[in-house]
């Protein structure tokens, strides 16, 4: 490509890249960035579209679709169900995932490798497979999809989200535990702290950002989950399924308004998560 | 001493029993049930527990099923390749060239991963439609006179949306491996009179291969298993991918055994692919000893990344 560079000082080499390849790289990178974000911006822009169908040209600006959204009974119920579902799933995933991370970090038992792979499987498997697997299981044991309604959106979907998302907690907390120097725990025990005190005052503060962060992730992921939910949902739709229903009836900017709200909530949660992660470093 | 130890032991057992029991009941059993269902026989629309190989016979004997699986794999392969071509340069740029706001930019790239998957597929519907943004824009600047009907409802639309959805996914592990390359290695290569191309070819690229493998595995498996994009954006030739078969066999046709058989084929393909990817990563990435669960491997899934 380029001629062999002479031995240069680092400062000069840094100033140098104004050549074709650097330009091409910057151009490509910016293009990819635009490719990722432009479609999302279009969706958000059309939430403020002052016309009844989503079409070119864009008519600025109205907030009425957010009003439609707030008064849409189905959407409000779905939002309630989604929130409940996300909270329950987060609770379950934490209750199981944190001990799960400790088990991976500190226990040896036959089948541990299988346990590890199984926990992670829902992350990489297409959601549809996990969804139908849970569906066959719940139908076999006779747990109705609407059981627990209206207290919960249905036990199968709650358990399904919990099971599929436990992996997120396990990966995050386990990763943190591996970086943790257990000498600290030994020191605490040597100083006559009980096992509980050691956990509470030594271990927990270390893993807290990972635990909180994974809780936030599980929450947003549950809020947006569609494949597993699709098979397990009972009488009450969740937000993504409600949006899905709207989409099939024809597109109004109400869909965009709903999408914008979901988008905003997710971004806020993810930004908090990123903050936690940074504090942890 | 021993008096305090034995209750502790029970405590430890109980502590371990919770996650292990949970995973057994809510993951292992369901996957096994799915497997079992693929051998059950449907008599007059009723599920029976008689074992049969009929479902697999029908699956492989009816052109629809193998064709759809191959079609989905073909789509997924092209989506993977395109995602890689887009993700690698951006990952490279972020890892080596961007100096200010690097973490912020990286976060910005991967935020869409956690943001409504449905919305990302839907975005393309309003962009590519007959009266969509792209047609409107092209007409208003005078490039075309009539709206192009071919944009939406085609396999190109499906692939475009899937590339859009899975590019950040592919980027994440690639960025993580590039980030981990010590700058001293690149400097050493330059000091030894390697050209920039040689440095890339012989230093950066080999070290980034585990990330490439992980990213491509995610993109392939998840885009092959996608069922939203084909319904929203696919045309006559492309509204049906393998997950759509599963959805309609379970949801509409109530032929659970056949649906389970299709799922088991998908599951088998996925697990085979994952195993191969792990082997490759081990070969290129210094073996299992070098692997951490939060490392960007198919085993560790990056930082809790997830399909939407």
Image (cartoon, helix red, strand yellow):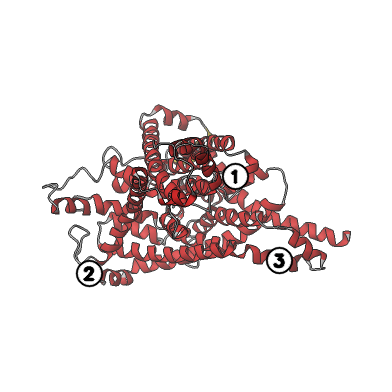
Task: For label 2, count other residues whose C-alpha is less than 10 Å away and answer few (under 14), some (14-19) or many (20+).
Answer: few
Kindly indicate the quadrant of the structure image that contains residue B63.
top left
Residue on which the image places disc 1: A117
- Determine whether the residue tagged by mark 1 lies in a helix, strand or loop: helix
Q: Residue at x 17, y 50 (%)?
A: B138
| Circles 2, 1 touching at the beta carbon (< 8 Å) | no
* Residue A61 image offset from top left, x and y in percent: 22, 69
Instruction: Quote the CA–CA distance across marks 3 and 1.
Output: 29 Å
Q: Disc number at residue B185? A: none
Mark positioned earlier in the residue sequence (2 or 3): 2
Mark positioned earlier in the residue sequence (2 or 1): 2
A5 versus B117 height, above or below: above
* Residue B191 image offset from top left, x and y in percent: 52, 40
Residue on which the image places disc 2: A61
Q: Residue at x 31, y 42 (%)?
A: B239
- Determine whether the residue tagged by mark 2 lies in a helix, strand or loop: loop
| Circles 3, 1 touching at the beta carbon (< 8 Å) | no
A4 versus B8 height, above or below: above
Kindly indicate the quadrant of the structure image that contains residue B188.
top right
Residue on which the image places disc 3: A202
Task: For label 3, count other residues whose C-alpha is less than 10 Å away and answer few (under 14), some (14-19) or many (20+).
Answer: some
- Label 1: chain letter: A
Mark 2 vs mark 1: tell me if same chain: yes
Q: Horizontal placement of A126 versus B122: left or right?
A: right
Q: Horizontal placement of A17 versus B271: left or right?
A: left
Instruction: Quote the CA–CA distance across marks 2 and 3.
Output: 54 Å
Q: Residue at x 36, y 54 (%)?
A: B118
Q: Nearer the viewer, residue B22 or B254?
A: B22
- Determine whether the residue tagged by mark 3 lies in a helix, strand or loop: helix
């Amino acid at each position: 490509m380029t001629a062999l560079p002479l031995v240069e000082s680092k400062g000069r080499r840094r100033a140098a890249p104004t050549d074709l390849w650097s330009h091409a790289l910057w151009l490509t990178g910016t293009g990819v960035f635009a490719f990722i974000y432009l479609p999302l911006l279009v969706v958000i822009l059309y939430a403020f579209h002052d016309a009844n169908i989503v079409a070119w040209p864009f008519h600025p600006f109205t907030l009425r679709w957010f009003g439609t959204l707030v008064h849409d009974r189905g959407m409000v119920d779905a939002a309630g169900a989604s929130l409940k579902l996300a909270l329950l799933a987060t609770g379950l995933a934490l209750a199981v995932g944190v001990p799960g991370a400790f088990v991976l970090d500190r226990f040896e038992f036959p089948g541990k490798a299988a346990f590890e792979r199984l926990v992670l499987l829902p992350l990489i498997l297409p959601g549809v497979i996990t969804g139908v697997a849970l569906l066959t299981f719940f139908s076999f044991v006779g747990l109705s999809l609407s059981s627990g309604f209206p207290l919960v959106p249905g036990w199968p979907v709650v358990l399904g989200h919990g099971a599929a998302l436990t992996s997120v907690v396990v990966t995050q907390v386990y990763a943190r535990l591996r970086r943790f120097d257990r000498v600290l725990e030994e020191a605490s025990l040597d100083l006559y702290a009980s096992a509980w005190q050691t956990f509470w005052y030594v271990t927990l503060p270390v893993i807290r950002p990972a635990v909180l962060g994974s809780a936030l992730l599980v929450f947003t992921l549950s809020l947006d989950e569609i494949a597993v939910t699709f098979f397990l949902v009972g009488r009450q739709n969740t937000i993504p399924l409600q949006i899905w229903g709207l989409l099939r009836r024809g597109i109004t900017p109400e869909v965009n308004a709903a999408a914008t709200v979901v988008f905003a909530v997710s971004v806020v949660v993810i930004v908090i998560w990123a903050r936690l992660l940074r504090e942890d470093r | 001493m021993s008096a305090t130890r034995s209750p502790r032991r029970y405590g430890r057992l109980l502590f371990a029993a919770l996650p292990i029991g949970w995973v057994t009941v809510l993951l292992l059993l369901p996957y096994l049930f799915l497997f079992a269902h693929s051998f059950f026989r449907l008599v007059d629309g009723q599920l029976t527990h008689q074992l049969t190989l009929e479902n697999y016979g029908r699956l492989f004997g009816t052109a629809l099923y193998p064709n759809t699986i191959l079609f989905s794999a073909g789509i997924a392969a092209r989506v993977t390749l395109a995602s890689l071509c887009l993700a690698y340069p951006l990952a490279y740029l972020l890892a080596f060239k961007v100096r200010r706001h690097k973490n912020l930019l990286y976060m910005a790239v991967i935020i869409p991963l956690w943001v409504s998957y449905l919305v990302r597929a839907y975005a393309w519907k309003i962009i590519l439609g007959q009266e969509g943004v792209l047609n409107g824009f092209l007409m208003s600047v005078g490039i075309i006179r009539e709206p192009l009907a071919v944009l939406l409802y085609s396999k190109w639309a499906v692939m475009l949306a899937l590339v859009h959805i899975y590019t950040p996914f592919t980027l994440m592990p690639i960025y993580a491996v590039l980030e981990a390359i010590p700058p001293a290695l690149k400097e050493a290569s330059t000091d030894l009179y390697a050209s920039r191309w040689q440095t890339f070819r012989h230093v950066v690229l080999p070290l980034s291969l585990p990330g490439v493998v992980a990213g491509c595995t995610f993109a392939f498996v998840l885009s092959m298993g996608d069922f939203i994009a084909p319904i929203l954006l696919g045309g006559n030739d492309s509204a049906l991918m393998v997950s759509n078969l599963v959805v309609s066999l379970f949801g509409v046709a109530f032929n659970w055994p056949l649906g389970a058989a299709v799922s088991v084929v998908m599951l088998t393909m996925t697990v085979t692919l994952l195993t191969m990817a792990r082997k490759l990563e081990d070969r290129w990435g210094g073996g299992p000893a070098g692997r951490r669960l939060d490392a960007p491997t198919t085993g560790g899934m990056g930082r809790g990344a997830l399909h939407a």
